[in-house]
Image (cartoon, rainbow, N blue to C red):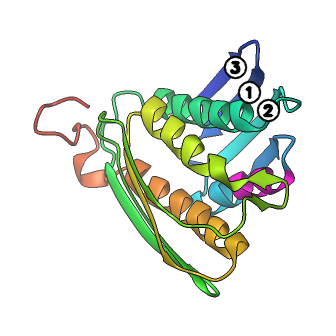
């Protein structure tokens, strides 16, 4: 069973994550930011990941600490759940259309954290979510999971659709990368012999 529990507490936030990589898309997410919770639900559902997540933080300051720390804790959960990464596909990608918007997400679970993020949004807020912080979320996830993550939004009219397409594509790409390849179940997918 590839699963992990992360309990991250700082003076700014308290984040709890339960992750089951080989899940069914069952989720229970409460982050204090409705639209952000909805995006994480879309990520889990489309990635067929069981995800329980609760997040409290210093929202009187702003959303930055909460959103970034959610990325940190989620990244740590994936890193812990995948362990040595034996038998995984390692690479994953998805192109997701959502009405007017198209999102492209590619991931390499390689141990080398990197984020390339190209997504222009028109509005600073979508629902209650400060969209300026999405890049910080994905950066924190990439660093703490040890993945290379590329996100590109070539076009779209609605910011809601753009962001949701990104999270759906992110879920599908992570599922592909984490999935076990039955032909190489005991191998670590690297010429180095480790990730």
Position above or below: 45 against 88: below
> Does the stretch in magenta take in 24?
no
Residue furthest top as drawn: 11
Determine the residue positioned at 80% across, 44% down: 29
Q: Quadrant of residue 92?
A: bottom left
Q: Quadrant of residue 54?
A: top right
Q: Secondary structure at mark 2?
A: strand
Q: Nearer the viewer, mark 2 or mark 1?
A: 2
Determine the residue positioned at 64% across, 23% down: 6
| Disc 2 target residue | 55
Residue 137 seen anywhere in this rendered image of the structure: yes
Query: Picture coordinates of residue 136 (x, y %)?
Result: 57, 41
Task: Determine crowd level at label 1: few under 14, some 14-19, many 20+ residues with C-alpha closer than 10 A.
Answer: some
Q: Mark 2 vs mark 3: which is more N-terminal?
A: 3
Position above or below: 3 against 157: above
Query: Picture coordinates of residue 103 (x, y %)?
Result: 51, 72
Marks 2 and 1: CB-CB under 8 Å?
yes
Q: For the magenta stretch, what is the residue range?
A: 34-41
Q: Mark 1 vs mark 3: which is more N-terminal?
A: 3
Q: Secondary structure at mark 1?
A: strand
Q: Is residue 71 left or right of residue 83?
A: right
Determine the residue positioned at 29% across, 35% down: 112
Q: Main secondary structure of the magenta part?
A: helix
Query: Picture coordinates of residue 148 (x, y %)?
Result: 35, 45
Marks 1 and 3: CB-CB under 8 Å?
yes
Query: Picture coordinates of residue 183 (x, y %)?
Result: 24, 53
Task: Determine crowd level at label 2: few under 14, some 14-19, many 20+ residues with C-alpha closer than 10 A.
Answer: many
């Amino acid at each position: 069973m590839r699963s992990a529990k992360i309990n991250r507490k700082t003076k700014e936030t308290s984040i709890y994550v339960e992750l089951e990589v080989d899940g069914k898309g069952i989720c229970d997410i409460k982050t204090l930011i409705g639209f952000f919770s909805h995006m994480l639900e879309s990520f889990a559902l489309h990635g067929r990941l069981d995800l329980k997540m609760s997040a409290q933080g210093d929202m009187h300051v702003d959303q930055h600490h909460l959103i970034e720390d959610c990325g940190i804790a989620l990244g740590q959960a994936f890193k812990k759940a995948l362990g040595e990464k034996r038998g995984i596909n390692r690479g994953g990608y998805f192109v997701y259309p959502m009405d007017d918007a198209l999102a492209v997400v590619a991931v390499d679970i390689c141990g080398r954290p990197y984020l390339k993020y190209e997504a222009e949004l028109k509005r600073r807020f979508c629902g209650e979510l400060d969209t300026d912080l999405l890049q910080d979320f994905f950066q924190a996830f990439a660093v703490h999971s040890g993945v290379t993550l590329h996100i590109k939004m070539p076009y779209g009219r609605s910011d809601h659709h753009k962001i949701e397409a990104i999270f759906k594509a992110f879920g599908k790409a992570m599922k592909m990368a984490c999935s076990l390849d039955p032909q190489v179940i005991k191998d670590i997918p690297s010429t180095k012999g480790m990730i």
